[in-house]
Amino acid sequence: MEQVPNRDMHPSFRAEAEGGAACGADLEQALAEYGFRLLGAFIPEEDDGIPALPDGGRTQAVILVGNAGPGMWAAFQRGRRDEKDPLDSWTRRVIEPLAANLGLGVVFPFAGPPWAPFQRWAERCGTMFPSPIGISIHPRYGTWFGMRAALLADALPEVPSFAEESPCAACADKPCLAACAIRAANGGEYDAGRCIDRLKTIEGHGCLKNGCQSRHACPVGQDYAYGREQAEFHMRAFVATYGPIVHGF
């Protein structure tokens, strides 16, 4: 498929209303202060189950916001408090007033159950794709990004676009699969329970401290790899959050 230059906008992301471009620029500037990025946007359909706007109007656009690389980490450390789920709580403190100031609704991936289908929404954007290790991949950031919120708007803003095809499509060797010592991922099927069990052992200590070896092995987005402190934070949060879920306790 045609490659879209990084600074251009894919036609499907162009503003549908006069305020769309301005909203996109204002939003991008406000998010940058906290190390967040616009990851993509899409026009919702009826079966997406998207909530209404704060004023009760119909949501015309969903904008996915998140972190990529270490940029968010410094801002989070400055605003971090001693509380349960510090990153999620900090994200709320940052995103909710920002969205309110722009008249946008907001949905968080950590607010559940029920859990919003963020990975499916990511695929709708055309900037994020499924990967062989079961998480989304971005043509620029690789797997070194996280979705932190979905903003709900009345117009589709201009959002940077990238390749229209997953970088995994041209990757014949799939080094991400071979890098995992226990083969927790197998071509898109990811065994979260097996991964979590490994992270709790001496053998899995390196992954726990440095981040997923499959992510490190992927050649895409290496410049955005998390530093050790950030990687360990996310890995420990993964074990604490999803361990009880996958093991049913």
Image (spheres, rainbow, N blue to C red):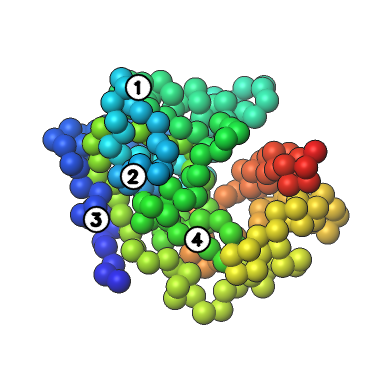
Does label 4 or label 2 sit earlier along the sequence?
2
Q: CA distance from mark 4 to mark 3?
A: 20 Å
Foreground disc of the pair 2, 3? 2
Q: CA distance from mark 4 to mark 1?
A: 31 Å
**Amino acid at circle 3:** His
Q: CA distance from mark 4 to mark 2?
A: 21 Å
Asked if the residue under mark 1 is in contact with the one under mark 2, i.e. CB atoms within 8 Å, the reply is no
Does label 4 or label 1 sit earlier along the sequence?
1
Q: Is residue 206 visible?
A: no
Residue 54 shows which numbered tag? 1
Name the residue located 67 percent from the left edge and 22 percent from the top edge: 82
**Amino acid at circle 4:** Pro
Q: Which residue is mark 2?
A: 45
User: Residue 118: image x %, image y %?
Assistant: 49, 45
Residue 90 occupies quadrant: top right
Q: CA distance from mark 2 to mark 1?
A: 18 Å
Q: Secondary structure at mark 2?
A: loop
Q: Which residue is mark 3?
A: 10
Q: Is residue 209 visible?
A: yes
Q: Which residue is mark 4?
A: 130
Asked if the residue under mark 3 is in contact with the one under mark 4, i.e. CB atoms within 8 Å, the reply is no
Mark 3, residues whose alpha carbon is within 10 Å: few (<14), some, or many (≥20)?
some
Residue farthest to the left, as pictured: 18
